[in-house]
Image: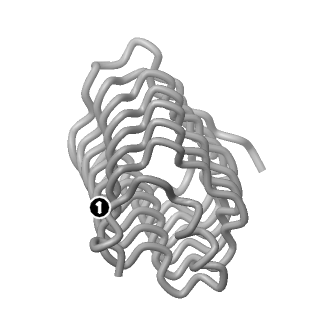
Amino acid sequence: TEIYTLSLHDALPIFGDNFLYNNKELKEINLNCEQIGSNFLHENKILETLILPNTQLIRNSFLVNNQSLKEINVKNLQVIGDNFMFFNNSTKQLSMPKLSKIGRFFLFNNNSIQDLDLPQIKLIDDTFLFKNTTLKNLYTPNLQYVGKCCLTKHPNRTNFMTQLNNIDRKSVV
């Protein structure tokens, strides 16, 4: 089996909607872009590595139903829209050092993430880590607001919620 790699270092700074939808060939993707539109990498069954070194904004429906992604590098990502890594069950660690805002359905029904590092996150919208039962370590020292349905159905939900400092408890359902 050959390994196919997509590397677009000189690509346009913004990728539009439906990019690489239902890809069946690429195992590694390395994109140099500032923004990514909606429906990026839906239904990818063989992608293992995704590198987005300069991406700052990801709109809606990113990495939906990807079952093979093991490594994701998004070190400069600052804002994520709705449906990020929706129905993904292969990525164990996720570090986003500059991320400050997350939309709805972040890691929804994702039963592989064990370590989640979000040191700059301030706002998390609704349905954060919903139906995720594998999370062991959550790092969010600057979190100020969490929407409803945070860590719903997680066996250690109470422990995680007590670790989150300075959040609006009325918003956590």
Q: Crowdedness of circle 1 by 10 Å Cα count: few (<14), some, many (20+)? A: many
Give residue 23's position: percent from left, percent from top. Answer: 46, 54
Q: Quadrant of the C terminus?
A: bottom left
Q: Residue at x 45, y 30 (%)?
A: 98
Q: Nearer the viewer, residue 2 or 52?
A: 52
Q: Nearer the viewer, residue 166 or 47?
A: 166
Q: Residue at x 61, y 34 (%)?
A: 5
Q: Residue at x 71, y 41 (%)?
A: 3
* Secondary structure of residue under mark 1: loop
Give residue 86's position: percent from left, percent from top. Answer: 43, 68
The mark total stands at: 1
Q: Amino acid at mark 1?
A: Asp
Give residue 171's position: percent from left, percent from top. Answer: 28, 71
Q: Is residue 98 above or below residue 1?
A: above
Question: Which image quadrant for residue 72?
Answer: top right
Q: Can you name the residue that lies furthest to the top here?
A: 10
Q: Is residue 48 left or right of residue 169?
A: right
Residue 6 in view in this figure = no
Q: Nearer the viewer, residue 76 or 44?
A: 76
Q: Nearer the viewer, residue 71 or 149?
A: 149
Q: Residue at x 60, y 49 (%)?
A: 139
Give residue 82's position: percent from left, percent from top. Answer: 28, 59
Residue 26 in view in this figure = yes
Which residue, given by chain and number where applicable, does mark 1 sit on? 125
Q: Is residue 53 above or below residue 102?
A: above
